[in-house]
Image (tube, rainbow, N blue to C red):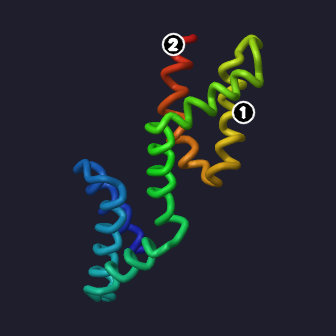
């Protein structure tokens, strides 16, 4: 019960100070380790490195980078143009074209994060312009 009070107390104080949530969780765990008598200076860095040593987590920035390269190179625009040719002049066709372009990009990249980076930069301004 005492540990729970320390946790919620430190959580509230750190959040009230405006510290980012990721750092708040690290600081709360440090407070709990210190008050619980389990203080070891290498525990937190080891857990942080083990959590970051994850292949899918490490691949996300590269998928976003690939999406940005495709957007800058014009591949995204060509895929959207192809999707608009497929869908024709249907009411709300740009939304349908976005779905079809997402399907095409899913086949190309295999990553929803990279696909969102590639198409989001292009489609959001187009959708705002068309209404």
Question: Where's residue 126, x and y in %?
Answer: 53, 19
N-terminal of the two: label 1 or label 2? Answer: 1
In the figure, is residue 70 to the left or right of 95?
A: left
- Rendered view: 89 above or below 59: above
- Rendered view: 100 above or below 70: above
Residue located beneath label 2 in the image: 129
In the figure, is residue 115 to the left or right of 71?
A: right
Pick whichever, 117 or 109, lies toward us: 109
Q: Count the marks: how many?
A: 2
Residue located beneath label 1 in the image: 100
Pick whichever, 3 or 107, lies toward us: 107
The residue at the point 44 percent across, 56 percent down is: 61
Residue 31's label in the rendered image is none
Pick whichever, 15 or 8, lies toward us: 15
For the residues marked 1 and 2, what is the alpha-carbon distance in whole angstroms? 20 Å
Question: Where's residue 112, x and y in %?
Answer: 61, 48
Assign a secondary structure to mark 2. Answer: helix
The residue at the point 50 percent across, 63 percent down is: 59
Residue 85 occupies quadrant: top right
Question: Where's residue 91, x and y in %?
Answer: 74, 11
Q: Are marks 1 and 2 in contact (CB under 8 Å)?
A: no
The residue at the point 62 percent across, 52 percent down is: 109
Pick whichever, 2 or 27, lies toward us: 27
Which quadrant would the C terminus be assigned to in this image?
Answer: top right
Q: How packed is label 2: few (under 14 Cα within 10 Å), some, or many (20 or more)?
A: few
Q: How packed is label 1: few (under 14 Cα within 10 Å), some, or many (20 or more)?
A: some
Assign a secondary structure to mark 1. Answer: helix
The residue at the point 55 percent across, 27 percent down is: 123
Question: Where's residue 73, x and y in %?
Answer: 47, 38
Which quadrant would the N terminus be assigned to in this image?
Answer: bottom left
- Rendered view: 22 above or below 67: below
């Amino acid at each position: 019960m005492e540990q729970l009070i320390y946790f919620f107390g430190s959580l509230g104080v750190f959040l009230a100070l405006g510290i980012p949530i990721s750092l708040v969780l690290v600081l709360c765990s440090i407070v709990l380790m210190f008050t619980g008598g389990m203080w070891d200076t290498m525990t937190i860095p080891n857990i942080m490195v083990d959590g970051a040593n994850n292949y899918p987590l490490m691949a996300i920035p590269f998928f976003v980078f690939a999406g940005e390269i495709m957007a800058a190179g014009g591949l995204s625009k060509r895929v959207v143009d192809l999707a608009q040719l497929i869908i024709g002049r249907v009411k709300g066709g740009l939304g349908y074209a976005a779905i079809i372009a997402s399907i095409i990009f899913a086949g190309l990249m295999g990553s929803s994060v990279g696909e969102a980076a590639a198409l989001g930069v292009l489609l959001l301004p187009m959708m705002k312009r068309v209404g």
